[in-house]
Structures are given as structure tokens and as C-alpha cells.
């Protein structure tokens, strides 16, 4: 990456190291400018006004939909704006799941899932008496096609799975899983929150039925996300939220809804976020996901190799695909360890990362997680390695 790129991110400071992209990415100036432009120059609602600012806002909002659709190779109407991955997955679970599942249905899920994928389906299973079936993870915590085949059967109605785990960073074999799921008529609901910023996603090629991601993990603003759904499903799906702008006709006895995607966009949408997200997509496209992947991989390889050499550390996900390293300092609870890094102005994550089941699987209470991206540098990794050695010495000295 050339130095110009680092200047695009006003959050980057020489005495601050940001290794928490898996929680939320940094935002480039072009995204910030788009959000500010909306608030400063437009500040109008969409689809409702005849005045210039409203018409212009509507056209920028709908252009953003086209930009996102092109980015994932979807039809424009197959892109629904939501408030984030969590909202997108809840929409599918409660609109599709509640109406299509019963006590004879099975939902395939995994211990890798983020709570935003797991909890909605657990709730739907409770309400419909459907069964949750867990794919058995292999020794390293990976999902294999063979293990998936073992839980797939004619009762499977939904496969709710992640593309990339936010704890392990491994890319799951989604294309093959989807092909097998479709053979028995099940739908695939893919959580792509940790994939969209790293790998090219082509929904036609993957053939998943629903796909969810968040703007804020891919250089965009918080508060905006995407639900992609195949037309066939969106057309027949009931709205999840009811209210302003999603209705066609309202009568005292019965009301009707607009077509998709509008019927899923009730109330005032996160307009500034949508415009910012469009800029984020442009930024990623200009830089090229392949270049991002190559750079991140090189930095990660160096990081992993050097961190593995340090004694007094346990790493849980060797050979991660997307720049995530999850680890612990021996005998030091993650919440204690993180305070040492925080004092040195290093941002990383500690805890269960909204994925308790994978921590249970690994047999640990919590962990530390660093995640690198294209705006991180080798000097930052070196500083981290140095601080980690100091931290190990420090905790040993005080009796951990
Ligand atoms: C894999 C995964 N799924 C879902 C989510 C939830 O995303 P959001 O909080 O933006 O709705 C996250 C966020 O950490 C994630 O990493």
C-alpha cells in the first residue's frame, strides 16, 4: 500500500495502533465527506418530497442501491437497506422462519456463529418447535463439507451460517454447502459481515438465498447494513417492520404493502449512512479487493509467524484467512491483558466477541483478538510484538 492510503484515514495517528477492524473498520475521508454532505447540504427525507433537496436525496439513495447491487452482482431490487447485519438476519429469521418452519423442520447452524445469526434462529426454533442442528466442527474449529453432509437431511429447511467467523477468520466452503442445501430444497442464509471487506462476493455465483452485511465493517458508517435476498423470496416474504413509506394503501380494515425492497424499509432510513456506504464501496473498488487481500495476507503472515515465536501465548486459529488472530496470554484473563495494551494506545478486542459458543468449543472463557487490514503497517505489528513481550513479563512478575 502506498503512503497516500494512510492519509485517507483521519483516525490513523502515529501514537495509536488500530487492530480492531473485525469490530468496526476505520472510515476514509470520502465516506465522512458523504455523511457530512448529506447533513450539511441536504438533510431531507427520501421518496416523500417534491422539493429539490428531497428529490436529490432520493436519487442519491437509489444510486447507492445500484452501487451496492453491482458490488455483489445482485439485481437492484434484491438489495434491502437495513440497520446492519443484525437487523438483516432478524428480518429473515422472523419473516421467513416464523412462516415456513414447524415442529418437523430443522435449522442447520454452527458453533462458529455470531450471536446475531445464532440468537434469532434460536428464538425462531423456540417459537416454531423447529430443531437446531449443529455442524460438528473439526479439531481446528473449521466447518467441513463432510461434517455439513452429516446433519443435512430431508427435514432441513434453513442453513444459517457465516462466510467468515469473527473469531477464527476462516472462510467457510459456502458454495458447496449451498449446492447441497439446494438439492434437498433448503434455503441458505449467509452472514457475510466478516467476508464482504475481504473477498469478492458474487451472489449469483454463490447462489445463497439471503446474505447480510454491515456498512461499518467495510469502511462505511455505522447504522446501515444490507440484506440481499433472491427476488423469489423477497417477493413472497412478509414485511418485518410496519410503518411509514412501506405501505401501498392504508385502510381501516386492511392495508397493502409496496413491492420489495421498499416494503422492508419502514420508517426513515439511515440516509446519511446509505450515502456513506456507497462511497465505501467505491473506495474498496478503487483499491481492489484482490490488492487488499494480498496486502492483508502478507501482513498477517508476518504477524502470525512472529507472534507464534513468543513464549507464553496460545493462538487458537493458525492460518486464518482474513487477518484475524485470536489468542490469550498464558494464565492471564483476557480482560486483564487488554488493559495493558490499552495503556499503550493499542486497540484490540477482548471478551467473547459476541460468539460465546465458539469459546465454549475452544474450552476458554474469553480471548484477545487482533484483526489487521490494508491500512495497518509492519511497524505497528512490530510495536505490538514488543508490547506483548513486555506484557508477558509484567504479568509474570505480578504473579499471574
Ligand atoms: C460475523 C458477524 N456477524 C454479525 C455481526 C453483527 O454485525 P452488526 O453489529 O453490525 O449488526 C458481526 C459483528 O461483529 C459479525 O462479526
Image (tube, helix red, strand yellow):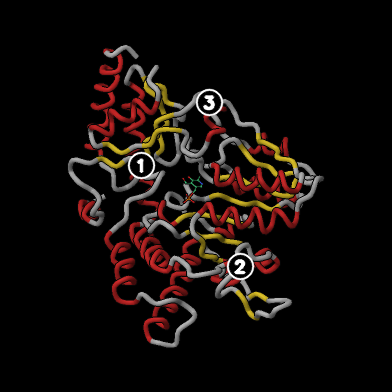
Taking the image as shown, residue 282 lies to the left or right of residue 259, namely: left
Q: Could you say where residue 319 lies in the image, as x and y percent from the top left?
A: 44, 32
Whether pointer 3 and pointer 1 mark residues with C-beta atoms closer than 8 Å, the reply is no
Distance of label 3 from label 1 (alpha carbons): 21 Å
Q: Nearer the viewer, mark 2 or mark 1?
A: 2
Label 2 beta carbon less than 8 Å to ligand 1: no
Q: Which mark is residue 362?
A: 3
Q: Could you say where residue 391 lies in the image, as x and y percent from the top left?
A: 27, 22
User: What residue is shown with label 2?
Assistant: 242
Residue at 44% from the left image edge and 73% from the top image edge: 61
Q: Could you say where residue 397 lies in the image, as x and y percent from the top left?
A: 26, 12
Residue at 24% from the left image edge and 32% from the top image edge: 343
Mark found first going from the N terminus, 2 or 3: 2
Q: Residues within 10 Å of mark 2 (few under 14, many from 20)?
A: some
Q: Is residue 174 above or below residue 70?
A: above
Q: Which mark is residue 48?
A: none
Q: Secondary structure at mark 1?
A: loop
Q: Nearer the viewer, mark 2 or mark 3?
A: 2
Distance of label 2 from label 1 (alpha carbons): 35 Å
Mark found first going from the N terminus, 3 or 1: 1
Amino acid at each position: 500500500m502506498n503512503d497516500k492510503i494512510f492519509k485517507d484515514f483521519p483516525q490513523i495517528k502515529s501514537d495509536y495502533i488500530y487492530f480492531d477492524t473485525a469490530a468496526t473498520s476505520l472510515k476514509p475521508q470520502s465516506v465522512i465527506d458523504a455523511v457530512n454532505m448529506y447533513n450539511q447540504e441536504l438533510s431531507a427525507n427520501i421518496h416523500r418530497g417534491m422539493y429539490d433537496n428531497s428529490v436529490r436525496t432520493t436519487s442519491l439513495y437509489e444510486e447507492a442501491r445500484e452501487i451496492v447491487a453491482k458490488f455483489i452482482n445482485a439485481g437492484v431490487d434484491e438489495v434491502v437497506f437495513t440497520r446492519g447485519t443484525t437487523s438483516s438476519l432478524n428480518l429473515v429469521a422472523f419473516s421467513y422462519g416464523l412462516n415456513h418452519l414447524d415442529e418437523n423442520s430443522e435449522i442447520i447452524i454452527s458453533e462458529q456463529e455470531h450471536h446475531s445469526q445464532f440468537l434469532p434462529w434460536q428464538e425462531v426454533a423456540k417459537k416454531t418447535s423447529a430443531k437446531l442442528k449443529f455442524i460438528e466442527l473439526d479439531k481446528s474449529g473449521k466447518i467441513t463439507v463432510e461434517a455439513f453432509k452429516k446433519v443435512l437431511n430431508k427435514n432441513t429447511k434453513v442453513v444459517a451460517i457465516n462466510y467468515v467467523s469473527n473469531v477464527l477468520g476462516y472462510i467457510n466452503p459456502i458454495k458447496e454447502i449451498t449446492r447441497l442445501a439446494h438439492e434437498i430444497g433448503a434455503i441458505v442464509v449467509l452472514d457475510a459481515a466478516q467476508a464482504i471487506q475481504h473477498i469478492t462476493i458474487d451472489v449469483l455465483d454463490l447462489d445463497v438465498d439471503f446474505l447480510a452485511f454491515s456498512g461499518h465493517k467495510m469502511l462505511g458508517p455505522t447504522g446501515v447494513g444490507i440484506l440481499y435476498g433472491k427476488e423469489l423470496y423477497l417477493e413472497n416474504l412478509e414485511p418485518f417492520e410496519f410503518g411509514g413509506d412501506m405501505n401501498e394503501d392504508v385502510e381501516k380494515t386492511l392495508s397493502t404493502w409496496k413491492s420489495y425492497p421498499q416494503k422492508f424499509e419502514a420508517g426513515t432510513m439511515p440516509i446519511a449512512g446509505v450515502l456513506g456506504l456507497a462511497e465505501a464501496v467505491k473506495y474498496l473498488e478503487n483499491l481492489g479487493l484482490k490488492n487488499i487481500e494480498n496486502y492483508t495476507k502478507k501482513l498477517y503472515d508476518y504477524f502470525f509467524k512472529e507472534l507464534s515465536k513468543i513464549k507464553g501465548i496460545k493462538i487458537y486459529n493458525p492460518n486464518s484467512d482474513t487477518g484475524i488472530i485470536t489468542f490469550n496470554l498464558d494464565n492471564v484473563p483476557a480482560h486483564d491483558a487488554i488493559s495493558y495494551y490499552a495503556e499503550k494506545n493499542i486497540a484490540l478486542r477482548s471478551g467473547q466477541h459476541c460468539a460465546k459458543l465458539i469459546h465454549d468449543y475452544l474450552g476458554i472463557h474469553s480471548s484477545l483478538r487482533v484483526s489487521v487490514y490494508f491500512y495497518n503497517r509492519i511497524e505497528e505489528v512490530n510495536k505490538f510484538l514488543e508490547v506483548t513481550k513486555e506484557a508477558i513479563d509484567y504479568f509474570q512478575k505480578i504473579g499471574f
